[in-house]
Image (tube, grey):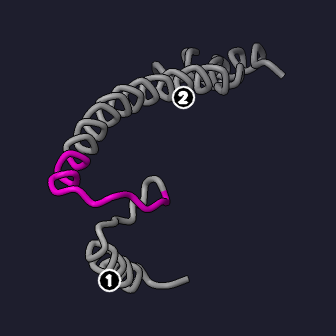
Amino acid sequence: MAPSWLAAYVIGWLQANLQKVGLLWRESNSDLEGFQEGKEAQALRGYEKNLLLMGSFFLFLSWLGFFFNLLVLISVHSWAVSRKERFLFSSALTEQDLLVEQVQEILKEFPT
């Protein structure tokens, strides 16, 4: 495959030679078109309008995807926390210093 700078060089020569006979290579259509003065500016305005519309649409989808991904991460995390972890972190073991007997009593209720 040719490097991009070489492709640009070749297309530049192609366009210059085709313009001499009143033609233009349109990359988006992969076809020859008649050359008209000002047609490139009109095509550029259409491209910019399309770019603005699609950019706005994809920006919206990007944020929508971000929030959906955040929702999935939060829900998966809540499902992924084991019963053992919930039990330990909600018990008195995390609240204060306990006696050995109290720790053993709490661990008797530990889920298996």
Indicate yes or no whether the magenta region holds residue 79: no
- Residue at x-position 27% and y-position 72%: 19
Q: Which residue is mark 1?
A: 13
Q: Amino acid at mark 1?
A: Trp
Looking at the image, residue 52 lies above or below residue 96: below
**Image check: 66 left or right of 24?**
right
Tell me the tag on residue 73. Answer: 2
Q: Amino acid at mark 2?
A: Leu
Measuring 71% from the left and 15% from the top, which residue is drawn there?
105
Location of residue 84 (image quadrant) = top right
Q: Position of residue 112 (x, y in %)?
A: 84, 22
Which of the 4 image quadrants contains residue 8? bottom left
Badge 1: how crowded within 10 Å, few (<14), some, or many (20+)? few
User: Which dot marks residue 87?
Assistant: none
Q: Quadrant of the N terminus?
A: bottom right
Give 32 or 83, whichever is nearer the viewer: 32
Give the residue drawn at x 32%, y 83%.
13
Name the secondary structure under disc 2: helix
Q: Is residue 37 magenta?
A: yes
Vertically, is 37 above or below 103? below
